[in-house]
Image (tube, rainbow, N blue to C red):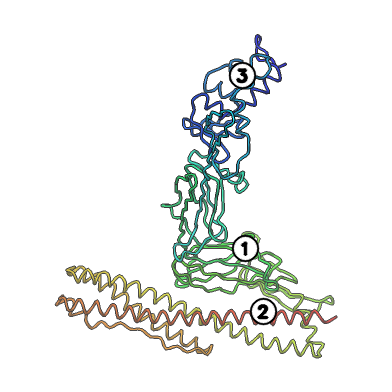
Amino acid sequence: MIQTSEKTRFTEAEMATVRDTDLPDLLISLGYQVKRIGRYYTTQEMDSIRIKDRRTWFRYSEGIGGDAITFLQRFYNKSFPEAVEYLLTWHGRARDSPPVSTPRQTKEKEEKVPFKDGFLLDDTPQTVQVKEGQTVTVEFRNQPMGNLIIHKLSSKDKTPLKGVQFKITYADGTYLPDEGGKLSSNGLYWTNAEGQIILSGITGTVVVTEVESIPGYTIDPNTQSQTLVVNPDDTQQLYFYNAPVGGVEFTKVNEADKTETISGVTFEIRRVSDDALVDTVTTGKDGKVFLPLEADNYYAVETDCPDTFKLDPTPIYFTVKDGETTRKTVTNKAFSGILLHKIDAATRKGIYGVTFLLYDGNMNPVDQFTTDQNGYAYASILREKTAAVKVAGGSTAEKILQLEEREGYLMSQKQELQEALDAGSAALSCADQILSELDSAEGWGTWDLVGGGLITDLVKHSHLDEAQASVETLQTQLRRFKTELADVTIDADIQVSIDGFLRVADYFFDGIFADWAVLDQIHQSQEQVHQTRSQICGVLDHLQALMEQTEADTTSISLEVEQLVASVSM
């Protein structure tokens, strides 16, 4: 027996009957307009309520829920005994009397007959009269539920974006019951390889919000959250676009095994034009790091790496263009030997230029090492064994000497390539500055053409003066660039100049023909600088390809030497 008050007691059987109350049926009998949403029910009058498994309810706007008893207590101010007695009467049972077969109970059994997922349940009762000897057909039609397809694309070229995170809920904040909630535990979904999220079996008002984009793209706040209505037997589609952000992505890998990425590698990113520090970044668990950057020329320097790898401070030059990601894969050699770190006792910073001597077991000096800019010195065991193999002579030693000679040439070529890349990057930055000034002069020149006057002239020619000064600088840098290119057997004839002979006529006559002539001259200069810039970019691309090939060849030689040394028993 269950005691509910001093005067009222209910049997276990009675309580089991009450707790098994079909809530949608109960609410219909109470006058509510009940509707099905996915695998849940709600009402027209209280759209934040959700009925699950037809037995329990929860109202999200209040954060409360329960069964049929608590529903009557909350919304009809009934006490516990009153609610139980009401439900027993609703079930057609007097106190402790056997169940009575009623139309409602029959209807309940009919509605428990399973129907195909993806369709709305038609729970509207139909009444028919069957006469003796007559067959009557009763037809129930189920509407298919709705579908939603979300597309995530790059705004630049409409490329599908995989891995973008969205939060998708109904308008009242409840989660979609898609596939029993298996696709998302908290309303979060991710786009697939086709840049899509496909949801089926839903009906109602849906809110779709982009939560997080992927590296290299930015969320558009104007379309970040979108709301739409998905009707039965309806497929709705939403499109979200992300604008690509210019920047650089570094991937750090093991030189010996490029499938092994390296986390915890730190780079300083500097601008080529003024050597200013832009930012400091560190690779994550996947060995990658992305940094958004404005269009310009930059270089990166590795300043820290895990102790198991040898730090490589060689500058890495790259160019960032508007809306494009420059990707660089950089290698580190696994360290085998002795790592020395000389630091200031007070500041704990590395000390540059300190020399150490390395002795063998008989206290004979065999090598010396000098700390780098970060205070590190590397004493390689491999190098000591290589020296011993060469001293011993033989075919292996001869092969190592040949490889080292080739490696020396490649290192020299690498130095020449780097100097050419530096000169070319400086020239490219100057060309971009000239184009910026010419673009401004063009704007003011167009305004002058429609009656801008003396002030417009002054501003226009101020930009032309800046462009002319930069042209002289560019010509100097191009001569340096050509000199550096000669060291790597690349020749390019690239020059640029701007004539200023029309300036006096433009000032003093200030007529339509003079203005047109100056504007035409600006256009010609822009075209010439664009051609020059295109030539510089083409040569830089070629130089970068040569640098990458040289680095690959150097790595290959180092690995071959290591294999040769390892094959010798000492």
Which residue sits furthest top? 7
- Could you say which disc has been placed on residue 146 in the image? none
Tag 3 near tag 1, CB within 8 Å: no
Q: How many numbered callouts?
A: 3
Asked whether 133 or 184 is in front, the reply is: 133
| Left or right of residue 413: residue 238 | left
**Amino acid on which disc 2 is placed:** Thr
- Could you say which disc has been placed on residue 349 in the image? 1
**Amino acid on which disc 1 is placed:** Lys
Asked whether 199 or 270 is in front, the reply is: 199
Q: Is residue 570 visible?
A: no
Cα distance between the residues tagged 1 and 2: 31 Å
Sooner in the amino-acid sequence: mark 1 or mark 2:
1
Cα distance between the residues tagged 3 and 1: 86 Å
Q: Position of residue 412 (x, y in %)?
A: 60, 85
Element under disc 1? loop
Residue drawn at x 35%, y 74% as measured from the top left = 435
> Which residue has dot 3 on it?
92
Sooner in the amino-acid sequence: mark 3 or mark 1:
3
